[in-house]
């Protein structure tokens, strides 16, 4: 019997700031699944230790804005004076290779992607508790007290958006391994759904 062929998935991983999306992505990469991880483009300066094309696609502002004008981004936003965007070609390149494409994005961006690719798999990562999220953000020590409060207020709003996602994954304190295993299992289960249509980026 011929092996069943399943069309590649677009997996959108989202959740509030500080919930552990980057840490989860780092562990998902270690699983060595046939996945393609989307690289976001940005106009911010490259930082020490970062690799262009791996951590981000670093662009000057003129190039970024030209791409924006040509509708080459799935989603984009200006944050603290710098532009960030998800190039469409990053997603289509991975899908054409037959790989499941993993896209990490904020909650607002996920809503935009849902309009473009409604049959993607939307996974929302939540903390074990709101206090855990507060603790993670405070450990970063990169924000002032007012900035911290803004992030927490925004996180509360974002946690109310869970209904717009297909699956929830809980990232409890000191149990990232379980969260990563849950994401892996969720992707596998979705992958094997019969009759699932291919993802099209409009």
Image: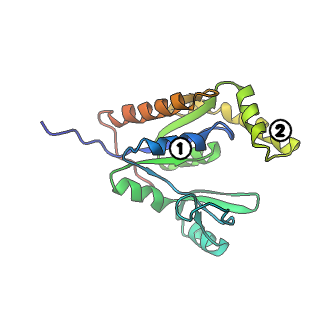
9 vs 135, left or right, is left
The answer to which quarter of the image holds residue 149 is top right
- The extreme top residue here reads 129
Q: What element does badge 2 sit on? A: helix
Vertically, is 143 above or below 169?
below
Q: How many marks overall?
A: 2
Q: Which residue is mark 1?
A: 25
Instruction: Indicate the quadrant containing the C terminus: top left, top right, bottom left or bottom right.
Output: bottom left
CB contact under 8 Å: marks 1 and 2: no
Kindly indicate the quadrant of the structure image that contains residue 69.
bottom right
Residue 143 visible in the current orientation: yes
Question: Can residue 11 be seen here?
Answer: no
User: At 48% across and 41% down in the image, what residue appears?
Assistant: 28
Q: Toward which corner of the image does residue 168 lie, by quadrant?
A: top right
The outermost residue toward the bottom is 62
Distance in Å between CA atoms under marks 1 and 2: 26 Å
Q: Which mark is residue 36?
A: none
Counting residues from the start of the chain, the first of labels 1 and 2 encountered is 1
x and y percent of residue 48 in the render? 67, 62
The quarter in which the N terminus is drawn is: top left
Relative to residue 129, is residue 28 drawn left or right? left
* Near-viewer residue (61 or 135): 135
Q: Position of residue 42 (x, y in %)?
A: 63, 63
Question: Residue at the spot x=64%, y=72% of the render?
Answer: 60
Name the side, left or right, on which 65 lies relative to 118. right
What residue sits 67% from the left and 62% below the top?
47
Please give the residue where the numbered disc 2 appears in the rendered image.
149
Residue 41 image point, x, y percent: 58, 62
Circle nearer the viewer, 1 or 2? 1
Callout 1 secondary element = helix
Q: Residues within 10 Å of mark 1 (few under 14, many from 20)?
A: some
């Amino acid at each position: 019997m011929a092996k069943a062929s399943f069309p590649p998935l677009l997996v959108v991983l989202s959740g509030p700031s500080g919930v552990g999306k980057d840490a989860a992505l780092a562990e998902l990469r270690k699983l060595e699944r046939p996945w393609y991880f989307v690289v976001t483009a940005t106009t911010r300066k490259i930082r020490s230790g970062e690799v262009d094309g791996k951590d981000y696609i670093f662009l000057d502002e003129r190039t970024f804005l030209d791409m924006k004008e040509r509708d080459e981004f799935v989603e984009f936003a200006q944050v603290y004076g710098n532009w960030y965007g998800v190039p469409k070609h990053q997603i289509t390149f991975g899908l054409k290779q037959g790989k499941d494409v993993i896209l990490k994005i904020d909650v607002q961006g996920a809503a935009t992607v849902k309009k473009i690719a409604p049959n993607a798999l939307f996974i929302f990562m939540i903390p074990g508790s709101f206090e855990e999220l507060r603790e993670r953000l405070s450990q970063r020590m990169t924000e002032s007290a007012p900035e911290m409060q803004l992030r927490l207020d925004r996180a509360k709003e974002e946690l109310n958006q869970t209904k717009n996602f297909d699956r929830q994954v809980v990232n409890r304190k000191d149990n990232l391994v379980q969260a990563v295993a849950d994401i892996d299992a969720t992707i596998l289960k979705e992958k094997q759904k019969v009759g699932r249509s291919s993802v099209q980026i409009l």
